[in-house]
Image: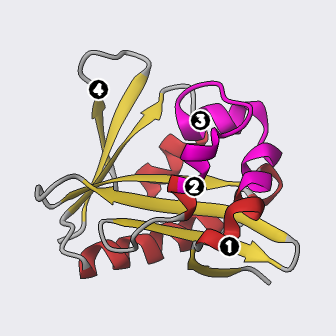
Amino acid sequence: MIALRPIVPQDRQAFDAFVRGLSAESRTHRFLAPVRELAPAVLAALTQPDQARHVGLVAHDERGIVGEARYVALGDSGRGEFAIAVADDWQRRGIGARLLGDLSAAARRAGIAVLQGEILRTNVAMIKFVLQAGFRLKPCPGDATLTFAELRLV
């Protein structure tokens, strides 16, 4: 059974294992660059969100983390930049949709009106996912390798 909850600092090792366990393609899709592992400072930042301006959620089972979603508020613009990743073996099982649902609800409660993010154009599965979730896509100014996704929450 998969449960969702906020990420906490004690998740550092499990989150590191989650990221390392992603395929090279999935890590590139998540971080928009080829990474093998996260630098200690990045790992700390991702496992210690303030849960107000930076909300992080994890999906987990008894063995560990199988998915993550987060948004970071972009100043006082009413916008938040989002990211979602699901372990390769767990994709297409509804975990991403559950994470996005909980993340969107948290963003609405925090006054975020729009979730936005950049997606590599090669990440066809994520593009299909966000379109099904109601996001609008447009070209990313200045970078033909990315597409810009936006979801109005209010």
The numbered disc on residue 73 is: none
Q: Nearer the viewer, residue 51 or 131?
A: 51
What residue is shown with label 1?
A: 10
Q: Is residue 57 left or right of residue 61?
A: left
What residue is shown with label 2?
A: 44
What residue is shown with label 3?
A: 29
Q: Residue furthest front?
A: 41
Distance from Cα at disc 1 to Cα at disc 4? 38 Å
Tell me where residue 55 appears, x and y as whole percent: 41, 68
Task: Give the magenta part as a residue range.
Answer: 16-44
Asked whether 41 falls inside the magenta stretch, the response is yes
Distance from Cα at disc 2 to Cα at disc 4? 32 Å
Q: Are marks 2 and 1 in contact (CB under 8 Å)?
A: no
Category of crowding for the residue at label 1, using alpha-carbon neighbours closer than 10 angstroms: few (below 14), some (14–19), many (at least 20): few
> In the rendered structure, which disc, 1 or 4, sits on the residue that comes first in sequence?
1
> In the rendered structure, which disc, 4 or 3, sits on the residue that comes first in sequence?
3
Q: Nearer the viewer, mark 4 or mark 3?
A: 3
In the image, residue 32 sits, relative to residue 96, either above or below, namely above
Q: Is residue 113 left or right of residue 43?
A: left
